[in-house]
Amino acid sequence: MSLDSTDLQILKLLQQDAGLSAAEVAERINLSQPPCWRRIKRLEQQGYIEKRVAMLNRKKLELNNVIYTEVKLTANGRQAVGEFEAAIRSFPEVTECYVMLGRSDFLLRIVTRSIEDYERFFREHLSQLPGVQDIFSSVALSEVKYTTELPLP
């Protein structure tokens, strides 16, 4: 299915504020509420809108550290990729995980209250996973840009 300009306007607005009602979206794009609601439902059913969430303020919650960690598995560890992925999914500190091409096998974004909390997570969980050969971590000093909005035409 191709998206028209109205669909893109709806997606853009909902990316900025998922709490908008169909009536509020309709008003902002000069569309009546019933067809706007139908479009939103169609976009949800077709998977363009996966879910609507509240974005929390990480710093207000005292989650002050963002650590990017590259993980390289051993040659034998590659056979246990599924186990590694399942373990990573179970750790709430890991907010993102990507399979990579290049020098590492996985890239993790980890959020903790302190460096000591990251060290504890590293020692008790991450370094204990089977098949892990190398772990390279970088601590973000400050946040220049953070968004969940995708660039829409």
Image: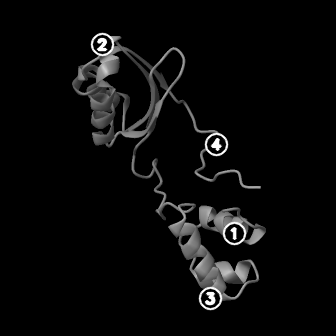
Q: Residues within 10 Å of mark 2 (few under 14, many from 20)?
A: few
- Could you tell me the amino acid type at mark 4? Lys
Residue 92 spot, x, y in % from top left: 32, 43
Residue assigned mark 1: 7
Distance, label 3 to label 4, CA atoms, is 36 Å
Under circle 4, the secondary element is loop
Give the distance between the C-alpha atoms of the residues marked 2 and 1, in whole angstroms: 47 Å
Residue under the image location 70 percent in, 51 percent down = 151
Residue bearing mark 4: 145
Q: Which label sits on residue 34?
A: 3
Residue at the image position 62 percent from the left and 63 percent from the top: 16
Query: Outermost residue, front direction?
Result: 1
Which of the marked residues, 3 or 2, is nearer the chain's N terminus?
3
State the separation of the CA atoms marked 2 and 4: 38 Å
28 left or right of 71 in image: right
According to the picture, the residue beneath numbered tag 2 turns out to be: 76
> Quarter of the image containing the N terminus?
bottom right
